[in-house]
Image (tube, helix red, strand yellow):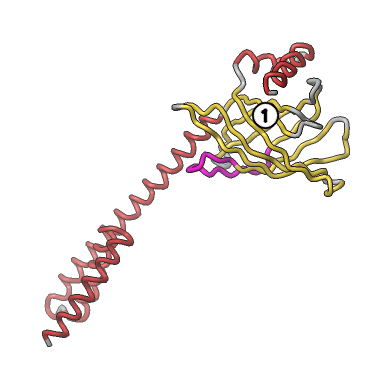
Amino acid sequence: MSKDITKLSNSLGSSLAKLHKAGGPLLVFIFVGVLTLISGNFFGGSYSGAIVAVGAVVTLACLALFAFLQLQSSSKSSQELRAFCDQLAGYWWEHITPNNNSAISFVTIEPDPATGTVKLHGRSFDLDGEPMSRWETIAVCVKLGDKKVFYYWEGKFPSKATASYEGFGQMSFHATGENIDSADGFFSDTNLENWSTTTRKLVTFRRCSPPEARIMNADEKDPRKKLIQNKLKSAV
């Protein structure tokens, strides 16, 4: 009999240790509460009602605390994601390699309340600073731990009114102190009228200064063209 009790005790101790390792003390207390409920029902005798009541209180309290902690954790993750997306917001230069078509884009990144991530839209220009296309993201995913943004984009070239372009992209952001002011990555570029034209291009991102942003948003041709040409020269 004593051997059976010892065996049961060791088995229970091992189970509780595993539960603690897997889910911490809360999971152990939940298990104990449920075990108390079962014990009260089957072995409590005249005290079964009191034992079941204690087991129910312990179980419900632990479940409520567990749910509260899960909500806190979820809320914390949402806050961290929102803070990261807010850091990315603003104007960026995107330098593109190879630059045989579009060479540079003026990109706006802004938080997207609908998805809890960000959305991007931009205008691309050729090596002479002439406008080439407009594009925007239609789906975005953020990998917060690695500071990466994955996106699907689509765009149009005014000179090719009937052709649509789209593809996947990835951006890896780099922090300098508390600021995020650069990124690198790539995107795929596909003409939907001819899938064999798909290319993969490398990109680097740098923050656009407030004076540069004012020139680009004013959209006056000569100042804009001069600025873009200077940005392309500085990137070489």
Q: Quadrant for residue 181, please give it.
A: top right
Please state if 36 lies on the left or on the right of 92 as rendered.
left
Is residue 17 part of the magenta span, yes or no? no
Residue 87 place in picture, x, y as percent: 51, 30
Q: What stretch of residues is rendered in magenta?
A: 137-149
Quadrant hosting residue 107: top right
Amino acid type, residue under disc 1 in the picture: Glu
How packed mark 1 is, by other alpha carbons closer than 10 Å (few <14, some 14-19, many 20 or more), is: many
- Where does residue 116 sit, x and y in percent of width and height? 54, 40
User: Dot 1 corresponds to which residue?
Assistant: 94
Q: Residue at x 14, y 80 (%)?
A: 45
Query: Could you tell whether 121 is left or right of 159 in the image?
Result: left
**Mark 1: which secondary structure?**
strand
Question: What residue is rendered at 22% in x and 62% in y?
Answer: 58
Quadrant where the N terminus is found in the figure: bottom left
112 lies above or below 223: below
Q: Residue at x 79, y 14 (%)?
A: 221
